[in-house]
Image (cartoon, grey):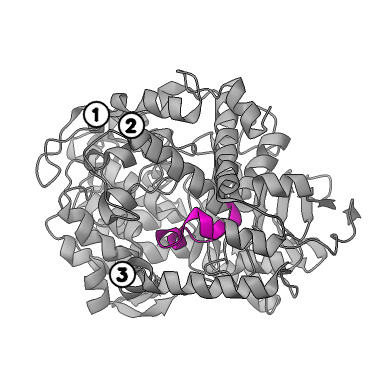
């Protein structure tokens, strides 16, 4: 291995100070260690922020996401591997083949902690191998290994095989959809965890990279151990006293939201044609608990344990989460909880994004409903409410053995366009939006439209203040003040993602808590204001990347359905998204010009000039 730095500075706390770079080019792989510069670590932290910095700086404009020139970054954060609650996460960052935007996908489990314990803050993958490979990292030893024994296998089978071959290791891998570069392919780790969105599994497949196997025996050094322990005790008390993190999520998991969102009239039903699902109770968190629940599970260092272990009459596995329940449930008009869970098992086993997979099937069901698929697919076209056919289609998308499965594997926008009805794709910038109808939440609608990675609920989760009342309740139908609120939440979430901790912790904790913990771990003083500035810097760098790739104000929008078609019934009936009332105000709050481009003054203030 070539090395710019043999070992990280012994005085480094929080970070390892090292990045490993693997080039898979067909002429022969090369491996190089390089330093994580302290100034870059301080400005971008790790995880999402570090990955965005590396992709932005090292990727040429206009690169095809599925070409060898694209890079794939796996990154941990300064809190990864510490005793901070929910700090077992990592980010995968690249240029998305689904959206063309810069894209980070966040995953939990144990894999991120293992990479950090192996002594690396990040892994950069370049080039493309002529033959299937996997990367094996065992502490400081990094090698590229033939993957012929696991190529062609599902993600579940691959994980099992490589875990047995390398005892005590953690595996991140792709399944068959990733191998054939389906745009809804994700990267699975620890069996049930996923870097799920944006088609980053297809990027991995384009490089002929089946897996990254990691085993680490180190630990993350903390600068002020005693003070950090005292701070952890305070943080744990706050998490334990919050009704969401201590009761709702541990008791019912994320599917606790099903009945609540339905009661608000914004549970997307039949491909967002309606906002009320008549049998929401039948697919709710309460129903999961009563019928198929076997136990709870969670990621490394997580006191919340929101994961569900479930079993149907035909299969078993992890999940489903709220978004998956919605995607295969009300989105497809399906009230059969067992089939919804089994669709989730298939996605986990094969490596498919459950949100985009279910949403794309729902899009196909609407096209079928309106007679757009009869000539091409006949009886094979899926229909709303047909649970068994929905499950069959998921399997077809995983295997790629049918024309319908292959077409749907490219996402709803491409599918709807190819069949003459692009307006049926419920997406932003090519990424399918999740299970909250934006007509019922004006701030959340603005967050969808302005998300740098496309239709995403996690860039700024306005469901917290607009529905859950966290940290305070705001009127979900009003537009006043929403632009500033969206900006603040986008910045805060970008910074939290760069610590590489679970976003659910922010339902109880504030930026001040994160800044304090970061300061104690690294020995570098971070104020709450500096922490928020880091998030703003990351957000603007993502925007600059998208601007250079041709994204403009025109893409900061929503499907016309949300702007012109009122919801027909329920507590959100007759509502539309009033995007025009918020977008210019949002740009002004961001310090961007009227076309959505960061001004020179903003870039100077953020240190991005």
440 vs 230, left or right, is left
- Measured along the vertical axis of the image, is residue 125 above or below residue 65? below
Q: Are marks 1 and 3 in contact (CB under 8 Å)?
A: no
Task: Rate crowding at label 3 as few (under 14), some (14 to 19) or many (20 or more) other CA atoms within 10 Å.
Answer: some
**Residue depicted at 63% across the width and 64% down the height:** 80
31 vs 532, left or right, is right
Number of numbered discs: 3
Q: Which residue is tagged 3?
A: 248
Residue 154 lies, in percent from the top left, at: 53, 63
**Image: magenta residue range:** 498-514
**Label 1: which secondary element:** helix
227 or 603, which lies in front? 227
| Residue 503 painted magenta | yes
- Measured along the vertical axis of the image, is residue 426 above or below residue 252? above
Q: Which residue is tagged 2?
A: 558
Outermost left residue: 569
């Amino acid at each position: 291995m070539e090395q710019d730095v043999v070992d990280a500075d012994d005085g480094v706390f929080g970070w390892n100070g090292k990045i490993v770079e693997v080039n898979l080019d067909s002429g022969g792989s090369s491996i190089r260690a390089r330093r994580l510069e302290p100034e870059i670590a301080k400005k971008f932290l790790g995880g999402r922020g570090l990955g965005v910095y590396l992709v932005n700086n090292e990727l040429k404009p206009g690169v095809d996401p599925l070409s060898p020139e694209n890079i794939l970054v796996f990154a941990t954060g300064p809190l990864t591997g510490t005793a901070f609650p929910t700090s077992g996460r990592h980010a995968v960052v690249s240029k998305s083949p689904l959206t063309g935007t810069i894209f980070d996908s966040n995953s939990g489990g144990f894999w991120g902690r293992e990479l950090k314990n192996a002594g690396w803050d990040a892994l950069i993958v370049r080039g493309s191998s002529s033959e299937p490979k996997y990367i094996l990292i065992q502490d400081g030893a990094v090698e590229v290994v033939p993957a012929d024994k696991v190529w062609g296998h599902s993600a579940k089978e691959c994980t099992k095989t490589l875990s047995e071959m390398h005892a005590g290791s953690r595996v991140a891998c792709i399944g068959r959809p990733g191998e054939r570069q389906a745009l809804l392919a994700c990267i699975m780790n620890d069996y049930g965890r996923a870097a799920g969105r944006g088609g980053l599994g297809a990027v991995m497949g384009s490089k002929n990279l089946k897996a990254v196997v990691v085993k680490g025996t180190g630990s993350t050094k903390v600068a002020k151990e005693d003070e950090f322990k005292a701070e952890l005790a305070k943080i744990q008390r706050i998490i334990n006293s919050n009704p969401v993190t201590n009761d709702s999520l541990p008791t019912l998991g994320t599917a606790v939201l099903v009945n609540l969102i339905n009661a608000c009239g914004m549970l997307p039903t039949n491909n967002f044609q309606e906002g009320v699902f008549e049998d929401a109770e039948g697919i709710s968190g309460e129903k999961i608990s009563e019928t198929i629940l076997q136990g709870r599970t969670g990621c490394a260092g997580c006191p919340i344990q929101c994961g569900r272990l479930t079993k149907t009459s035909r299969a078993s596995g992890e999940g489903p989460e709220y978004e998956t329940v919605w995607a295969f449930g009300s989105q497809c008009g399906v009230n059969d909880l067992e089939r919804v869970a089994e669709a989730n098992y298939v996605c986990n086993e094969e490596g498919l994004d459950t949100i985009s997979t279910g949403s794309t099937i729902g899009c196909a069901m609407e096209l079928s409903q309106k007679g757009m698929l009869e000539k091409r697919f006949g009886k094979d076209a899926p229909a709303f409410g047909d649970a068994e056919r929905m499950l069959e289609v998921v399997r077809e998308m995983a295997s790629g053995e049918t024309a319908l499965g292959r077409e749907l594997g490219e996402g709803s926008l491409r599918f709807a366009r190819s069949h003459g009805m692009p307006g049926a794709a419920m997406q932003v910038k090519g990424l399918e939006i999740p299970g909250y109808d934006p007509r019922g939440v004006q701030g959340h609608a603005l967050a969808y439209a302005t998300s740098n990675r496309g239709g995403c609920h996690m860039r700024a989760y306005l469901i917290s203040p607009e529905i859950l009342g966290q940290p305070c309740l705001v009127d979900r139908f009003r537009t006043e003040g929403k632009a500033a609120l969206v900006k603040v939440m986008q910045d805060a979430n970008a910074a939290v993602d760069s610590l590489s901790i679970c976003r659910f912790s922010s339902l109880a904790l504030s930026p001040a808590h994160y800044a304090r913990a970061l300061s104690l771990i690294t020995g570098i003083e971070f104020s709450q204001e500096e922490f928020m500035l880091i998030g703003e810097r990351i957000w603007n760098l993502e925007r600059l990347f998208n601007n250079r790739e041709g994204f403009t104000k025109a893409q900061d929008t929503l499907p016309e359905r949300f702007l012109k078609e009122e919801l027909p019934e329920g507590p959100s009936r007759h509502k539309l998204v009033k995007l025009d009332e918020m977008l210019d105000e949002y740009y002004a709050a961001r310090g961007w010009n009227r076309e959505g481009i960061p001004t020179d003054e903003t870039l100077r203030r953020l240190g991005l000039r």
